[in-house]
Image: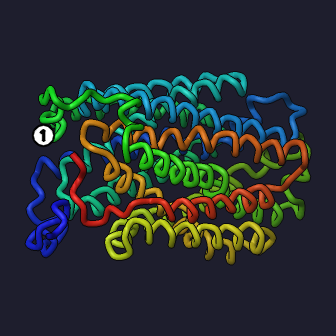
Amino acid sequence: MPDSHQQPQDQRSLRWYDGISRFQWTVLVIASLGWIFDVFEGQIFVASMNEAMPDLLPEQASFGDVAYYNQVTFAAFLVGGAVGGVLFGWLSDRIGRVRTMSYTILMYSLFTCVSAFSTQWWHMAAFRFLVAMGVGGEWAVASSMVAEVFPARARAWSGAIFHASSVFGTLLAIVAGTLIVGNPHIGWRWGFVLGTLPALLILWIRLSLKEPESWKKARANPAIPRASLSQLFRGRWGRHALIGVGLAAVGLATFWGVHVFGRDVLRGAKVRELTGTIESQMSQSQRQALLDAHLPTIKRWEMLGMLLVTTGGGIGLVTFGPICERLGRRGAFLLFHIGGLISALVLFLGLSGADPPLIMAWLPLFGFLTLGMHAGYAIYFPELFPTRLRGTGAGFCFNVGRILAAPILILSGWLQSHWNWSLAQAASTLSAIFLVGVLLLLFAPETRGLELPE
């Protein structure tokens, strides 16, 4: 007897976009816009941390001190995302996707703007925690909603498009980093002020979206228990949750500890070209003098590196959908985990002392292989849980993974601050975490072609 969860043959013969309604496209567009601004709020700190953190620390702070407090701030962002993802994911199962999405966007917009008024490093870390609560919550709600309104044959593509839209958020941060942060007449604080703009999206959400039918049916059925974390750990859902958390922890630890520093390899090459000195060997006063003298030039090269990594990463995110339809969810994750490890070792160990053109040629491939699997979280996590737990489960997986990743980033910063490890040493060491993802796939269920569990 055929599996009742498999798609009918006539459905599998359709192209993924055949028969998609206007409302379904609207859900995808609005969810993607929320995620774009979501990512912008996270990446604006990445685009400005080389200017912001030295400004928030004492003048005598060393290069290692700056690296350490940047990593602590990243860790605060990860933990905040975990809290917000679990909280708002659960809330979306209780009160609905649409209302909860509006709350998350309002939260991350407000506190990104407030970050501009930081005067100490811990102010920035605290505000990043609050920004991340909205960021983590928005992803959990939006990914669940996209999965629920699209048919099974379109989930891989729609989920990949949704997550790949994050590239535009990073591109916005690159533009802000180049034109605002890198402009000595404006400064890094105004980049954070831009964070208020996504709040305008809330009006469109409330006017255009309605709750998915599957959520309304689950809500109206008194026989279906209400969402709770205790429900999440009953039966097979608990195993699914642990696998999802592990995969997310691998992706988030390598994103914030490896992927985002790809651009700094190109920046470092330009600093060497300008001064003949490795930046980590400079004192804080020497580094500040270098920035004052060459800020626009160095910032342009740093943002060029970020653009190249982001471009490759965006292609990886978009292509993860068709790849996981061809290889299955597990096969696609395996390809990107192994590729991410190899590409990171080549960049940080093989090319860290190379000339800029060679680094520029490698950065897109590095971005492709270290970011592409993140689209899999938007595709795979909602497929692991029933409707009544989908927001809770997807939010739990993606965002508890942030908690596990946070101490890893603090350790990386500590090694640079106290043991004088270079960025290349720290990032290449963290890339070994991709191997943990390979091991997790041995226990992960394959969901390709299956209907969402009810």
Disc 1: CA contacts within 10 A as few (<14), some (14-19) or many (>=20): few
Locate the C terminus and report the quarter of the image it occupies.
top left
Residue 452 sits above or below residue 106 on the image = below
Number of on-image labels: 1
| SS state under label 1 | helix
Q: How is the image coloured?
A: rainbow
Residue 138 in the image: state x and y as whole percent. Answer: 38, 37
- Horizontally, is 432 left or right of 438 in the view? right
Residue placed most toward the observer, 444 or 73: 444
Residue 116 in the image: state x and y as whole percent. Answer: 58, 27
> Which residue is depicted at the point 54% across and 59% down?
440
> Which residue is depicted at the point 54% across and 33% down?
192
- Residue 439 figure quarter: bottom right
Residue 226 sits above or below residue 156 on the image = above
Residue 35 sits above or below residue 15 on the image = above
> Which residue is depicted at the point 64% across and 37% down?
75
Locate the N terminus and report the quarter of the image it occupies.
bottom left
- Horizontally, is 219 left or right of 49 in the view? left
Residue type, mark 1 in image: Glu
- Residue 289 figure quarter: top right
Residue highlighted by disc 1: 213
- Horizontally, is 52 left or right of 422 in the view? left
Residue 109 in the image: state x and y as whole percent. Answer: 43, 29
> Which residue is depicted at the point 39% across and 60% down?
445
Residue 402, visible in the rendered structure: yes
